[in-house]
Image: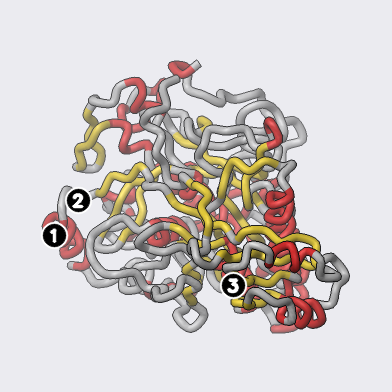
Amino acid sequence: MNRTLHCAGLLLALAGAGSAEAASYLVLGRSGSSAQVLQQQIEATAGGRMTRALPGLLTFVVQSDDAAYPARLRAVAGVQYVAPDRSFSLGEPHAEPLARDAAEAAAQMQQALAGGAPRALAGGAVDQGLLAGNPLYRMQWAVRDVQAPGAWTRGYSGNGVRVAILDSGIACGNAWLAPNIDFAAAASFVPGESVCVHPGFYFNHGTHVAGIVAALPSSFGTVGIAPGATLMPVKVLSEYTGSGAFSWVLAGIVHAADRGADVINMSLGAYPLNVTDPDTQAYLLVFGRAADYANARGAAVVVAAGNDAAQLGAGGDVGVPASAPGMITISASGPAGWATGNPGYAWLDYLADYSDYGPPIANAGPGGTLWYAYVNPAQICTVAGFTRNCYVFDLVLSTIPGGWSWAAGTSMATPAAAAVAALAIERGRASSGADLSPQSLANFRRTQADFVRGVLQASSVDRGPRARDPYFGYGRVDADNASNVFYQPPRVAPAPTPVYPAYAQ
């Protein structure tokens, strides 16, 4: 299969986070060490300076231009690893804006706001009547794939659940997102950049991801799977370069957990790293610690598998944080010619052509595919009055600054799973009485991360080979099942379903 068109929402590379003059390092203490004592010892080691302390992770960030400094740190009692503070770098996603140019985008925005700006959901209820004539909603196959309207009909929208978006910032003035943003808890760990991205009409990864979770319903515009959830934007990647140091992401996880996030979405990662490399072991350890830190505070951490069409765990290669313990790792699925109307192309749950797979996969989510682009890239389709190349409609439509855009990637699948997790948490709190008092809520949150993992496993729809498999994990997430307190998983797994479209075999 020719994969030259593979350029999806999460293409990541490794680069040094420090400059040529001063390199940055992560210093990990041994389990059981005193963070306070370790910090003092590191600060007393000549040749560098501490730039960030993450004592809850037994990890510290240091900087030095002395090549011998790391060796001196490794000799410090209690130090387990000293590894370069590398950076994640987002590649350009395969994105197709809804508008052809800024002028058309402005006209679409005027049309969308003509009936009034979207408002926060009253009591958390989703007015599905608002969506009945919405042309953009008609193109959101992903929302229906996860059966979100079933959860909405049952009264769940993610109300009261806090979802942290660790990404490249957010369009703070976006009318479909702003009412759901907790600005007081928002933060940027990217030096010199605000959590709010610059205005204009362009693709911004964080804004697209946030809209998949919690864009508000309206008569024109996309809607999120959990539109009643609260968004906590945490900027850990530069909106200009798409890159962000590992330490920024780690600090973002700690911040989100400390500020009460229930779900942490990380549509980012790095692959391939060789598992035999001591630095790789350091990265897996520290991100595992970060997951444990978040889980202990009630936050489930949902991460993207990656877009390399690679098998995680094969040949000693792993993804970070996709392969780290404690993460809920999401692969991407989607249709392959949905807009053509051909009944043979109606299946929505093929493994995406770019998606990484392997033992770490917990679940799959709708991330869009480019399968049909390989077969008939020039074919034209029209859906809801919008005419594009047919394969474009197999991507995921969501918010961007100044408008909307399609995009594909495990970056898009991950927030779908995070949104389903938000719906499950709301249902779990309501059915257990955890939302009746602060103390009962605190008790629920002690095991909330395990609850999320368990519900996603039990309520997902089995896809691919029977039971858990390396492509879809326990299955494609399902909002209707996850929000149904009476749902019981089938005793007999269904027959195997196709992993790839017939024309890709």
Q: What residue type is labelled 2?
A: Ala
Q: Is residue 442 visible?
A: no
Check the image and tell me how it is coloured: secondary structure
Report the residue at 68% width, 64% height from top: 68
Per the rendering, the mark at residue 256 is: 3
SS at badge 2: loop
Q: Can residue 32 be seen in this view?
A: yes
Q: Nearer the viewer, residue 226 or 27?
A: 27
Q: How far apart are marks 1 and 2 (CA)?
A: 9 Å
SS at badge 3: helix
Q: Give the quadrant of residue 290.
A: bottom right
Per the rendering, the mark at residue 385 is: none
Crowding at mark 2 (Cα within 10 Å: few <14, some 14-19, many 20+) = some
On screen, residue 198 above or below 439: above
Q: Are marks 1 and 2 in contact (CB under 8 Å)?
A: yes
Per the rendering, the mark at residue 107 is: 1
Q: Which of 239 and 24 is in front in this view?
A: 24
Crowding at mark 1 (Cα within 10 Å: few <14, some 14-19, many 20+) = few
The label nearer to you, 3 versus 1, is 3
Which part of the image, by quadrant, shows the N terminus?
top left
**Residue 357 at x, y = what percent?**
61, 35
Q: Which of marks 3 and 2 is nearer the N terminus?
A: 2
SS at badge 1: helix
